[in-house]
Amino acid sequence: MSSDVQPRRRLRVSGNVAVTALAFLVALVIGAVLIALADPPTQAAAKYFTAYPWDTFTAAGRAVADGYVALFEGAIFDPGTASQGTLSGILGPLSETLVNATPLILGGLAVGLAFRAGLFNIGGQGQVIIGAVFAGYVGFAWHLPAVLHVVVAVLAGILGGALWGGIAGWLKARTGAHEVITTIMLNYVAYYLLAYLLSVKGFQRPPYGQAISNVVEGNARLPHLLGGNLRLHTGLLVALLAAYGVHWLLTRSTLGFQLRAVGANQFAARTAGMSVERSYVVVMVVSGALCGLAGVSQILGTNTAITQDIDAGIGFDAITVALLGRGRPGGIVWAGLLFGALHAGGVQMQSATGTPVDLVVVVQSLIVLFIAAPGLVRSIFRIRTQGAGVGQQLAKGWNG
């Protein structure tokens, strides 16, 4: 029996990977068309397309090639800066990719974990903000020894995110309030609470003319991994450890089994003697803690002070990362790295070629669109569905 199950499982996994790769390819192709349409030389050549059609295709090809080359150079490796021979010149683009990926991985883990328990946590924005507020306040208001200071600040950020996520979990368990509604409302509460704090003396930086907090002390900063000239910090290692921890929780622990059981069928889980309400509270507390870690990464690693946009859209980008990673820790890590590369490379693409950075967001959205509609990708490439239908395969992918 096991010999029959294993090949089928491998077939399903390989099929999912193939569909994901093809979805990425289709998104890049459509993105190339949009880059060509937005390119001024291509637009100029298109005016005399009937007379010299090759000029239009040449200009379009050049725009697409330059755009994607700049995207690669901004995200992975830039020969121009590498020729300087410095560490920052060689590893600078990759460092930016990993810096951008770190909070996305943590946020994606938070959303993916909630998914596995049958909850939709879209309150990442608020949880990231509160985590950053807790960690940032400890970072600039408390004065502790070097190692102790950063540890306490990190724990404070985790606590802040866990408390904010736990509120939604408690409301779900106690009153049945839908987590989508409560997390959206808590996002607004956190956002405007931060706006208030940035106007309060003691939190706001003197001379109190701008909405920015005091600067986090050096003792509370996450150490850099590749020297002070590169922004990559130990938050990346924390994110990878968190991914392993979530994997262990879901696959090796009794609590993880209960969470997956509740996510698969809460009525059956209740019949089996599991506390569904307790599972809701626990998963939202852990999910909020992971988002709090994303806030920690932002304030103790990437930035030095809290501003109104400290969340940087991580809470909502994390949803796309979790979807692309199919709710699995390993997939979320790779999805976070991909989106981190797109974020880092998009800046270079805009500055080097003049391509609107919004097109990178369009490519990201297209990737998620095709990932969420695997049947469309299969029909485009005429891939036959093996065994169960696509909807059943996706369901198994989340809770299998």
Image (spheres, grey):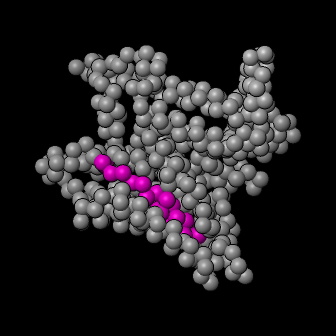
Which residue corresponds to the image point at 77% horizontal and 34% vertical from the top-left?
40
Could you say which is closer to the camera, residue 320 or residue 153?
320
> Does residue 220 appear left or right of residue 122 in this picture?
right
Question: What percent of the width, then of the height, locates residue 88?
Answer: 78, 46
Residue closest to the far bottom: 201
Query: Where 168 falls versus 318 (above or below)?
Result: below
Examine the rendered structure and indicate whether residue 382 appears above or below residue 118: above
Residue 225 spot, x, y in % from top left: 67, 51
Residue in the image at 45% along x and 33% along y: 371
Which x, y percent locates residue 207? Answer: 72, 82
Q: Nearer the viewer, residue 305 or 392?
A: 392
Q: How many marks?
A: 0
Q: Residue at x 56, y 30 (%)?
A: 27
- Is residue 200 or residue 81 the one in the foreground? 200
For the stretch drawn in magenta, what is the main secondary structure? helix
Q: Can residue 14 be spotted in the picture?
A: no
Q: Is residue 121 magenta?
A: yes
Residue 125 shown in magenta: yes
Name the residue nearer the viewer: 202 or 178.
178
Asked whether residue 393 is in view, the answer is: yes
Q: In which quadrant is the N terminus drawn?
A: top left
Where are the magenta residues, as a range? 117-136
